[in-house]
Image (cartoon, helix red, strand yellow):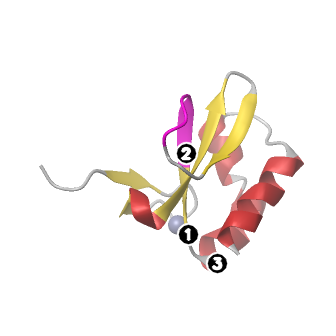
Amino acid sequence: MGTPLRMCVVCRKMKTKSELLRVAKNGGEFLVDVSGKLPGRGAYICKNGDCCMKFEKQRSFERAFKGALPSELKENIKKELI
Ligand SMILES: [Zn+2]
């Protein structure tokens, strides 16, 4: 019971899905998952400016997905969060 929590890849705090933006990797394709329902492996980031400012420098998504992140995806993440 209760609300399922997910961890932000930047601050590593557990939050509800509504507080987080999901990024999905399906095969070799990355997508900013605004709906939260896309298939594939997901990683989450807080919908706040703090974590958005840090994810590139900390390479948070690279660590979560164990690989490089397309620069276009980084721009799309920032567009959603700022
Ligand atoms: Zn965070």
Q: Which percent across, then down, holds residue 78?
A: 75, 65
Q: Please give the name of the residue rendered at 54% of the width and 29% of the height, measured from the top-left corner.
A: 39
Q: Is residue 41 left or right of residue 1?
A: right
Vertical order, 11 against 24 (above or below):
below
Q: Which of marks 3 and 2 is nearer the N terminus?
A: 2
Marker disc for residue 47: 1
Crowd around label 2: few <14 · some 14–19 · many ≥20 (10 Å): many
Give the CA distance from mark 3 to mark 1: 7 Å
Q: Which percent across, then down, holds residue 34?
A: 58, 53
Q: Which residue lies furthest to the right in this view?
A: 71
Q: In this view, does 3 lie to the left or right of 48?
A: left
The amino acid type, in three-letter code, at marker 3 is Gly
Membership of 77 in magenta stretch: no
12 or 44: nearer the eye? 44
Marker disc for residue 43: 2
The amino acid type, in three-letter code, at marker 2 is Ala
Membership of 42 in magenta stretch: yes
Give the CA distance from mark 3 to mark 2: 17 Å
Q: Give the range drawn in magenta.
A: 37-43
Q: Please give the name of the residue rendered at 61% of the width and 70% of the height, measured from the top-left corner.
A: 51
Q: Nearer the viewer, mark 1 or mark 2?
A: 1
Marker disc for residue 56: none
The residue identified by callout 3 is 49
